[in-house]
Amino acid sequence: RELWIEHRCWPVHDAAGRHLGRCGVIRDIDRRRTSVEALVHSEASLKALGRAAPVGIGTVRDRVYVEVNDRLCDMLGYPREALLGQSTRMVFPSDAEYRRVGETVYPLLARDGLASLDIRLLRSDGQVIDALLTSAPLDRADLSRGVVSTLLDVTQVRRDQALMEARVELSAVAAGGDLEALLRAGRAAAERL
């Protein structure tokens, strides 16, 4: 059987400085090497998952970005360097939305170990998007160690949903035959969209 070892040796001299030989230590590092290989494989798998995922993924500590994937950068319109080390406040359209998300998500994480919430985000170009945030703590007993979140851009889904609801509402009003009611419903639907 092949075995990985660490070998260290050094020369031994007497008081007069004459070389007497060598002394060494041999240590079995097979388990450590196997553990390191498993860790490297695990890290490579997680990085590939982050690249392949069709959602934005970020890790925050005290609501400051410490890790983000490319999809999150694309979704928010920022380069990675602009997000890392920055407060997540920069991607919320208002202080109220930032507070609402924090006041909702963190108690859920502490209680359930998972939180999911519809949120609004502000892209670097000023566009506000709708997203589904799903978060889990790295350590449920200590949220300060960090939280991993996925963000799915649901802006188009929400717009399509609102359009479908408006069509259903307008169809129902139109079936009643009241032109004034149809105009009122049409104006209200246009304002919502």
Image (cartoon, rainbow, N blue to C red):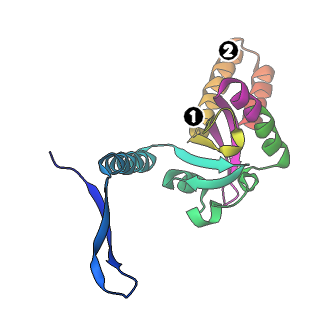
User: Viewed as shown, does residue 65 lie left or right of 178?
Assistant: left
User: Viewed as shown, does residue 191 lie left or right of 69?
Assistant: right
Q: Position of residue 126 (x, y in %)?
A: 70, 58
Q: Tag 1: residue type?
A: Val
Q: Which residue is mark 2?
A: 172
The answer to whether residue 78 is above or below residue 44 is below
Residue 143 got which mark? none
Q: Are marks 2 and 1 in contact (CB under 8 Å)?
A: no
Using the image as rendered, state which of residue 105 and residue 91 is in the foreground. 105
**Is 115 included in the stretch rendered in magenta?**
yes
Q: Quadrant of the N terminus?
A: top left
Q: Quadrant of the C terminus?
A: top right
Using the image as rendered, state which of residue 192 and residue 7 is in the foreground. 7
- What range of the chain is rendered magenta? 105-133
* Residue at x 57% of width, y 34% of height: 157
Q: Position of residue 128 (x, y in %)?
A: 69, 49
Tell me which numbered mark, 2 or 1, is placed earlier along the sequence.
1
The answer to whether residue 163 is above or below residue 131 is above
Using the image as rendered, state which of residue 81 and residue 189 is in the foreground. 81
Q: Which residue is mark 1?
A: 157
